[in-house]
Amino acid sequence: MSTNPSWNEHSVVEYAKSLDAIDPLRRFRDEFVIDDPDLIYLDGNSLGRLPNRTMKRMEEAVRDQWGGRLVRGWGEHWIDLPNRLGAKIAQLIGAQSDEVLVCDSTSVNFYKLIMAALEVQSEKSEILTDDANFPSDIYLLQGCAKQLSQRLKIVPQAEVASSLGLETAIVTLSHTSFKSGYIHPMQELTAKAHEVGALMLWDLSHSVGAMPIDLNGSNVDLAVGCTYKYLNGGPGAPAFLYVRRDLQEKLLNPIWGWFGQKDPFGFSLDYRPADGIQRFMAGTPNILSMIAIESGVDLLLEAGMDRIREKSVSQTEFLIQLWDNFLRKYGVALNSPTDSVYRGSHVSFGHPQAFQVDQALIEEMKVIPDFRQPDNIRFGVTPLSTSFEDLAQAVLRMSAVFEQGIYQKYPEQANGVT
Ligand SMILES: *Cc1c(COP(=O)(O)O)cnc(C)c1O
């Protein structure tokens, strides 16, 4: 792609269509429910679209499995779903099939793994994270630190490596930052954490399904991630956790539930942790929500993460060129890295009136991005369903919001779900 091309409104749409025409992943768009073709959805990094196959699968699961098989469904379909789905997600993140489990929420899994890690690192005194981490992760760390009398050190993004010390028990970071889309160098930081004897936990919520990840290749200890973002698992879908195989027997789940017990149906009154990854289960899995996850993961596996990343990079690159041509003149800043090596699959645009612009796009322009405090409008690219034409049209509509002053009638303050 040329740098700084000069486009007008017509030529840029034609150019975008020519990119769509040669896109090898083009056919995957038809795999998703797209009710209104004129609505441009750029929030798949927050809630992924619904795959057509998932609708069919859910209907069968509810009618035939729950309705028809009743409690027999456990043995026939459901009991090993957390492992079976975990094994599929393992293929997306460079892990072994017995190192990943689907269960609970990201926040709960994060708590389980942080507490488990701190227990074996009890001679050390500090938890290290950065201030670009997701607030839920930070809150959980504050709670864990209080519970175990550890110190929580929150440093600027660029100072993680230099803040490591022999006192560091665990380092935890969001691999891709939810605001800027910055990607931390996983292998390098994991190796540095190991040099001082710290364990490393990566939150993959904004990375999984958007780019290839190599947990084993980077010798990562622990990881968690969401399935309702780029994996298209549906609102509130259960999350996953990863524990490297050699650590599984050394760590204990702080939540001693019966599904993590060695023999749940032995109904013994004493807790004995199950072998392997199984011990990180807590209670009965959310079967219906779990069933909704599989088709989205299958689509990613079919498309291949390398091809998805390739398209994602050319789409975020295109968005930045569009910004340069059509948005910069209105005082819109680029809040994401310019180097694609360090950029995930969303681009954040900064503007003092970002919240108003976001509302105008949603209410009047049929574009759905999202707003993140204090001044970010995020355009999320989900390569299986986002077209280049979507991106060109969204940016043109955003420039119209500025040109015609449409944003001015919206309130300046955000409240509620954004
Ligand atoms: C989305 C996200 C979460 C959400 O956690 P839930 O328990 O599903 O609410 C956690 N961490 C990160 C980094 C996220 O991006």
Image (cartoon, grey):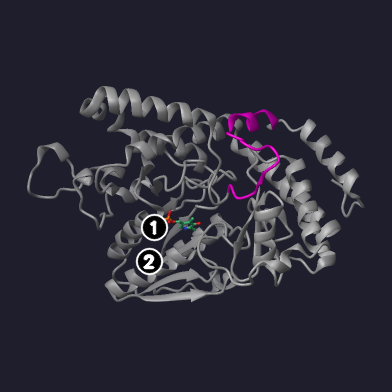
Q: Quadrant of the N terminus?
A: top right
Residue 349 in the image, given as x and y percentages of width and height: 70, 62
Which residue occupies 92% across, 52% down? 6
Give the label on residue 177, or none: none
**Residue 88 at least partly seen:** yes
Disc 1 beta carbon < 8 A from ligand 1? yes
Establish if 196 lies above or below 221.
Answer: below
Asked if the stretch drawn in magenta spans residue 30, the answer is yes
Query: Would you say the residues marked 1 and 2 are in contact, meaning their CB atoms lie under 8 Å apart?
Result: yes
Residue 39 in the image, given as x and y percentages of width and height: 67, 43
Asked if the stretch drawn in magenta spans residue 28, the answer is yes
Foreground residue among 333 and 150: 333
Which residue occupies 33% across, 22% down? 64
| Of pointers 1 and 2, the one earlier in the residue sequence | 1
Which residue occupies 45% across, 63% down? 172
> Is 72 situated left or right of 365 in this image?
left
The stretch in magenta equals 26-44
Residue highlighted by disc 1: 107
Residue type for callout 2: Leu
Q: Quadrant of residue 18?
A: top right
Residue highlighted by disc 2: 140
Residue 52 in the image, given as x and y percentages of width and height: 53, 30
Q: Residues within 10 Å of mark 1 (few under 14, many from 20)?
A: some
Which residue occupies 45% across, 46% down? 235
